[in-house]
Image: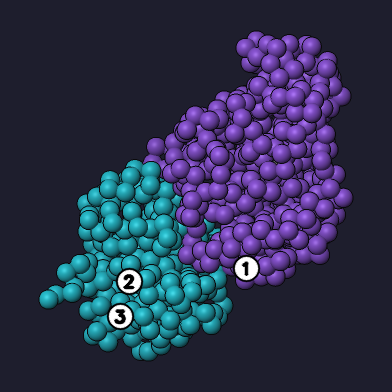
């Protein structure tokens, strides 16, 4: 019996890389922000194992100042879910794509329709940080039927008795939220990062990646001692906000890749 | 009962729920448990009512408006929440939540505020109970409600101006939520209306139930019957929920008045933001729209989920009034009754004035949710400009 029949592209690619001994690197970029398409392609070329594309939302409650600023700029420049998603099939990345957005953008068009749009736009997985496990059933069902993996977030505050269910529900990978707080670089890795990664690893064999708060390649390495890898977002987006462009993003991603490969 | 407890998932009909980051789910659960226990504990309930009485000034009177009634041909009774300590109904909820936070061992409160009334009330409770307090307020509101900002400072609270998004109440909620995500271990989010994730809509309504209970009793004493109409303004909907809850099981007509530029129920499109599934002003793809109202306290694109429910089952109605009607009602109550209402509360009166021809001879209970002192500055600009024309 093949237990892996419902494993999607995100999970199988990340599992494959992990099982080959690699530490995983997922890179977030705000869709619709000036130059985002080139940045996505450069990030993939520089060694990202998967790309997370933000669909900007008016009220990004899980995001800190950097991603808020990029989201607002993208919205002001006219970005919509449709305009961001329409661009994805033309991106030359060779790696799986997730979208990261907020639940109302799935709720408003309706679960089936939004899931189908994702599936038709070369999107493998979705992350909806304001849709917790207790509210996620109907969306996960619709996404699953459309072939979209829903990546669930496990927080430092998530109790032990909920973690197995949460990790079982998560597809693609398990997003271990590294700290109490919103997205943004921090000067040191929070102790909560290793703890939550460890707790997730002890209840699932899905890839477990630490995101939120990773601010340097050294921190990425430190988190990956326990975790299977990391997600970097604000550090990357800040390069774009600072005018570093796709080249700046490429350099940054390469530095994380090199650090993770060197261990 | 119409306004009963939400179901186990925190839903009123299909509305409500708990749409917050996973990080906050345990805090919402802990709050729900603590609230259930506290509300079943007579010592908690007694202390709540004792503070509302000895400190807050409850019960608030019911004032019959003789001159205005005669002028409009409608018998108008005001529930005087404007006479509460800190000048609005907000103190009821804040005393309840601050006591609960202390009982839960939290030492810090965060709050969002629009007009500043909820911020002032929270800062007041924090001073009273010796807690740290930080209030988030949109930059636009900081400018139009300077006096309340200064009050919060006097009361020992920190006020942070929020310059993201529309720079009003909705963005202040976002920022308060972000703070809470990072500080949940020692901090209680003292939400200011019947909105947000479960248990807030239900808990906040419960703390404001006292408005409806008192008013019901006062009406019976005065008229030996309930009023024909109960009307209140609706931002998130807490003062309306409080007074409605005293009359939901009578045959009184329930009317919640929204600002034309923030008519979440009026537009009737469901959406999810700030932890709840409710009616929400949004564009064609689901981006939340910015509300626009002369009153900062109603400048909110959503509404509490129980109001969405009451509207969906036809138990309450939610008409809208425009800024001009509000300005006229503000002046009318000042001149005929010697009561300067909050601009928020003036929305309720604006509806009564407009509907007066259809309400002839009826008794209307109006929740005067707050006093207008905070709005005098702003009205000097508005009326000054008008008289210059
Ligand atoms: C006097 C007054 N009334 C009403 C409101 C609106 O809140 P709600 O709809 O929750 O009663 C506010 C909010 O600031 C207020 O200050």
The answer to whether residue B77 is above or below residue B299 is: above
Q: Colour of chain A?
A: cyan
Give whichever of discs 3 and 2 has the lower sequence position.
2
Q: Is mark 1 within 8 Å of ligand 1?
A: no
Q: Is residue A107 visible?
A: yes
In the rendered image, residue B355, in percent from the top left (x then y), is placed at 63, 16
Check the picture and name the quadrant holding the N terminus of chain B: top right
Mark 3: few/some/many CA within 10 Å (<14, 14-19, 20+): few
Disc 3 or disc 2, which is closer to the eye? 2
- Residue pointed to by mark 2: A168
As displayed, is residue B375 above or below residue A70? above
What secondary structure is marked by label 3? loop
Residue B343 seen by the camera? no
Which of the chains bears the disc numbered 2?
A
User: Residue B183 got which mark?
Assistant: 1
- Residue at image mark 3: A205
Which of B25 and A65 lies nearest the eye of the viewer? B25
Tell me whether the residue at label 3 lies in contact with that at label 2, contact meaning CB atoms closer than 8 angstroms: no
């Amino acid at each position: 019996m093949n237990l892996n029949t419902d494993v999607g592209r995100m999970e199988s690619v990340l599992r494959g890389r992990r099982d080959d001994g690699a530490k995983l690197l997922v890179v977030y970029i705000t869709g619709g922000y000036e130059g985002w398409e080139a940045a996505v392609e450069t990030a993939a070329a520089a060694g990202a194992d998967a790309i997370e594309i933000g669909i900007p939302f008016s009220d990004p409650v899980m995001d800190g100042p950097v991603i808020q600023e990029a989201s607002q700029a993208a919205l002001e420049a006219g970005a919509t879910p449709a305009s961001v998603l329409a661009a994805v099939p033309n991106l030359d990345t060779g790696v799986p794509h997730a979208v990261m957005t907020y639940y109302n953008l799935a709720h408003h068009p309706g679960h089936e329709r939004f899931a189908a749009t994702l599936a038709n736009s070369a999107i493998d997985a979705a992350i909806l940080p304001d849709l917790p496990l207790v509210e996620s059933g109907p969306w996960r069902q619709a996404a699953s039927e459309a072939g979209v993996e829903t990546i669930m977030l496990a927080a430092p505050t998530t109790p032990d008795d909920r973690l197995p269910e949460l990790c079982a529900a998560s597809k693609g990978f398990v997003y271990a939220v590294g700290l109490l707080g919103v997205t943004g670089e921090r000067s040191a890795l929070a102790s909560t990062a290793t703890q939550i990664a460890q707790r997730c690893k002890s209840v699932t064999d899905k890839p477990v990646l630490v995101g939120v708060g990773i601010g340097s390649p050294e921190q990425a390495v430190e988190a990956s001692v326990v975790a299977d890898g990391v997600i970097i977002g604000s550090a990357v987006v800040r390069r774009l906000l600072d005018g570093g462009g796709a080249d700046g993003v490429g350099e940054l991603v390469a530095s994380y890749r090199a650090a993770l490969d060197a261990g | 009962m119409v306004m009963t407890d939400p179901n186990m998932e925190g839903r009123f009909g299909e509305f409500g729920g708990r749409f917050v980051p996973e990080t906050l789910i345990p805090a919402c659960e802990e709050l729900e448990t603590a609230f259930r226990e506290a509300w079943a504990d007579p010592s908690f309930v007694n202390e709540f009512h004792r503070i509302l009485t000895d400190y807050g000034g409850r019960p608030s009177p019911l004032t019959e408006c003789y001159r205005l009634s005669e002028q409009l041909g409608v018998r108008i009774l005001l529930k005087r929440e404007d006479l509460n300590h800190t000048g609005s109904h907000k103190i009821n909820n804040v005393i309840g939540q601050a006591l609960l936070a202390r009982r839960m061992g939290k030492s810090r409160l965060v709050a969002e505020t629009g007009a500043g009334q909820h911020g002032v009330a929270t800062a007041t409770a924090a001073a009273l109970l010796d807690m740290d307090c930080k209030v988030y307020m949109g930059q636009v509101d900081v400018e139009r409600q300077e006096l309340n900002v200064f009050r919060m400072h006097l009361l020992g609270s920190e006020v942070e101006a929020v310059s993201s998004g529309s720079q009003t109440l909705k963005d202040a909620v976002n920022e308060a939520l972000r703070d809470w995500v990072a500080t949940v271990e020692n901090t209680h989010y003292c939400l200011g209306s019947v909105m947000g994730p479960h248990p807030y809509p239900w808990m906040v309504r419960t703390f404001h139930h006292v408005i409806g209970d008192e008013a019901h009793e006062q009406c019976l004493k005065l008229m030996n019957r309930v009023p024909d109409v109960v009307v209140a303004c609706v931002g998130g909907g807490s003062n309306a929920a409080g007074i409605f809850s005293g009359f939901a099981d009578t045959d009184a007509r329930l009317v919640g008045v929204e600002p034309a530029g923030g008519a979440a129920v009026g537009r009737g499109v469901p959406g999810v933001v700030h932890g709840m599934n409710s009616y929400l002003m949004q564009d064609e793809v689901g981006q939340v729209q910015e509300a626009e109202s002369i009153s900062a306290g109603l400048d909110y694109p959503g509404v509490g989920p129980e109001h969405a429910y009451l509207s969906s089952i036809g138990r309450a109605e939610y008409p809208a009034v425009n800024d001009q009607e509000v300005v006229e009602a503000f002046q009318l109550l000042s001149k005929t009754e010697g009561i300067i209402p909050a601009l928020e509360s003036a929305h309720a009166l604006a509806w009564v004035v407009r509907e007066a021809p259809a309400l002839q001879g009826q008794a209307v209970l109006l929740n005067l949710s707050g006093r207008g002192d905070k709005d005098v500055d702003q009205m000097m600009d508005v009326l000054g400009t008008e008289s210059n024309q």
